[in-house]
Image (tube, rainbow, N blue to C red):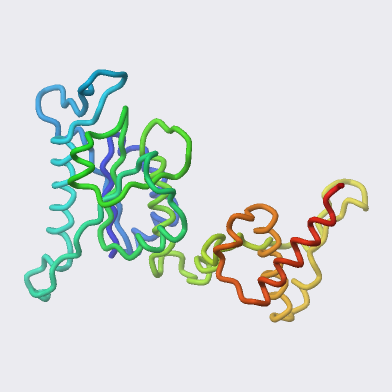
Amino acid sequence: MRRFSILTLFPEMFAPLEHSIVGRGEKQGLLSVEKIQIRDFAPGKHRQVDDSPFGGGPGMVMKPDVMAAALAHAKQRVSTTSPQADPESNADQAPQPSHVVYMSPQGKRFDQQDASRLAEQEHLILICGHYEGIDERFITHHVDEELSIGDFVLTGGELPAMVVVDAVSRMIPGVLGDAGSAEADSFQTGLLDHPHYTRPALWAMGEEESQLSGVPDVLRSGNHGAIEGWRRRQALLRTLIRRPDLVAGAPLSKAERRLITALAEDLEKQEPS
């Protein structure tokens, strides 16, 4: 079982995960998601989790001692509930160490390769920051990596953490049911996905007969080789148009590289002079 522990000031924000692919994975016993309230580990009546920054400046900084206590609890929880903690299990097998990720605008941009990599972790701890961030000493001593979902400002790390949990969960064997669904997703092959169509084969977009929209004939031909070829070509074309930055790093054959070059030349010819 893959385990997610989320350190947050707003655990209620993660309720939607219970109704998604993630929730289904939990019911099947393939993964678990634990939300840990950081404030529970703050001392005193007021449970203060932040304080003003040394050196002055705006905002507040989350306290390292509080964060360390919450993190220790997360690690202890998984060590006492993991299968290795069972006395009847193999005593020589040490528990998988926890991997700690801080959701931070200063982190590496999260991508599909990161999702696949993190899905190999037995226990993933996601830390949601707030205010001006977390005391740097905690980050230096306890965080394995920092991840960002984009170059924009959010109120806290909860939404990015949900993105990571969802993307990583899809890569856990059995969660999607059909392994091909994950393999065919956009970015998993280095390219955007091809267009998808379903019934009706003819769709009336308006009252006029000329507004009937059909499905590409090849998709209804029953020729699986031709269908796969069409889908691959469409994925190449869509990536070239919408995300040309992905093409250079995509794992393409020599024939596909030649096709990309030809498609690019065709697109240049179509551009108004």
Residue 80 vertical position relative to residue 189 in the rendered view, above or below: above
Q: Going 39% across and 54% down the picture, which residue do you hit? A: 23
Left or right side of 111 for 67? left
Q: Residue furthest front?
A: 273
Q: How many marks on residues?
A: 0
Whole-percent x, y for residue 215 in the image: 79, 64
Residue 199 vertical position relative to residue 272 in the rendered view, above or below: below
Q: Quadrant of residue 248?
A: bottom right
Q: Residue furthest right?
A: 209
Whole-percent x, y for residue 26 in the image: 34, 58
Whole-percent x, y for residue 220 in the image: 77, 73
Q: Quadrant of residue 169?
A: bottom left
Residue 8 vertical position relative to residue 216 in the rendered view, above or below: above
Residue 232 vertical position relative to residue 115 in the rendered view, above or below: below
Left or right side of 186 for 8? left
Left or right side of 105 for 208? right
Q: Going 42% across and 64% down the picture, which residue do you hit? A: 171
